[in-house]
Amino acid sequence: MQVTLIFFVIIGIYLFSMYWTQREMVGGIGGALGNMYVVIEKFFPPNFAVLPAIWEPMAQTIQMAILATTVSAILTVPLALLSAQNVTTFKPLYYLTRTFLNILRTIPDLVLAVLFVGLFGIGLFPGILALIVFSLGILAKLISETIESVDMNPMEAMRASGGNTLQVIWYALVPQVAPQFASLVLYVFEINIRASVVLGLVGAGGIGLILNQQLGFYNYPNAMAIIILIFVVVIVIEFISNKIREALL
């Protein structure tokens, strides 16, 4: 009875949400579908003649993701250790680090990009800074939870035999979390590739900035060619990352 009641309550929430969403839409779902056909028709056929001119911004987008992921992976190590309850036994430091990481994760990447673009101007540097902060919140959270789930017996055995904190971390903790660490870094790198495209829409450099310019000039065939290129690059990078993760795990 309880499961059935919960099921119908959820169905009711979905139906109410569908009704309220269409109520707020001008023209409803039918009008949206018609507009979608009109908009999509403008994007075809894509103008692939622009591809030679956008390889450099695409490379800049990949470079942004690589730099941001590398820096955030380095900064994550101390933060993840400090926010892992089984490593940091000093509770005030543990809660302070956790709170700091929670604050980082609550700030959207677009807000970070707008903030850094306002501080440093349009270009790659504010985009890299935004991706570093964005990645740091995700990586530190995931890796700290990985650290908290490790087998504590090797660490306790090293402590009992006289090992100091650094020795315990290096010889008992690192071998257990290293494969997961590498896998999560690759996962965040994939996220950064996608995020760097979006950040370009607010002036943070890369291929997203070019895409935003083409959309602003109503050059929809050029924009479609850029979108296809981004799609292919993301698929290739995701395939390579998956193969690397499978080899590591």
Image: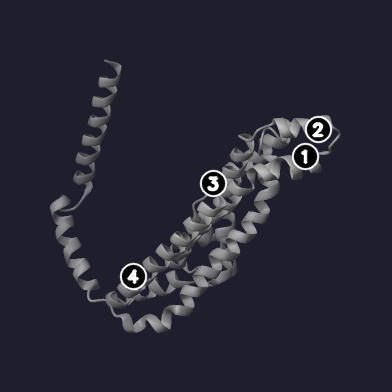
Local SS, label 1: helix
Give the Cα separation between the discs numbered 1 and 2: 7 Å
Q: Is the Cβ of the residue at disc 1 closer than 8 Å to that at disc 2?
A: yes
Q: Is residue 42 visible?
A: yes
- Say which residue label 1 marks: 168
Q: Nearer the viewer, mark 3 or mark 1?
A: 1
Task: Please report the residue visible at 48 percent of the width from the left and 62 percent of the height from the top.
Answer: 240
Q: CA distance from mark 1 to mark 4?
A: 49 Å
Q: Secondary structure at mark 2?
A: helix
Mark 1 and mark 4 lie on one chain; the one further toward the N terminus is: 1
Q: Are marks 2 and 3 in contact (CB under 8 Å)?
A: no
Under mark 2, the amino acid is Arg
Query: Quick one: 42 or 84, which is closer to the camera?
Result: 84
- In the rendered view, would you say 78 is above or below 196? above
Tag 1: residue type?
Answer: Val
Q: Which mark is residue 159?
A: 2
| Label 4 or label 2, whichever comes before in sequence order | 2
Q: Quadrant of residue 53?
A: bottom left
Which residue matches tag 3?
105
Q: Residues within 10 Å of mark 3 (few under 14, many from 20)?
A: some
Callout 4 environment at 10 Å: few (<14), some (14 to 19), or many (20+)?
few
Q: State the mark number for residue 228.
A: 4
Left-right relation of 211 to 150: left
Question: Mark 3 near mark 1, Cβ–Cβ under 8 Å?
Answer: no
N-terminal of the two: label 3 or label 4? 3
Whole-Å distance between the Cαs marked 4 and 2?
55 Å
> Eyeballing the image, is 189 above or below 159?
below
Front of the two marks 3 and 4: 4
Where residue 215 sits: x, y (%)? Answer: 33, 72
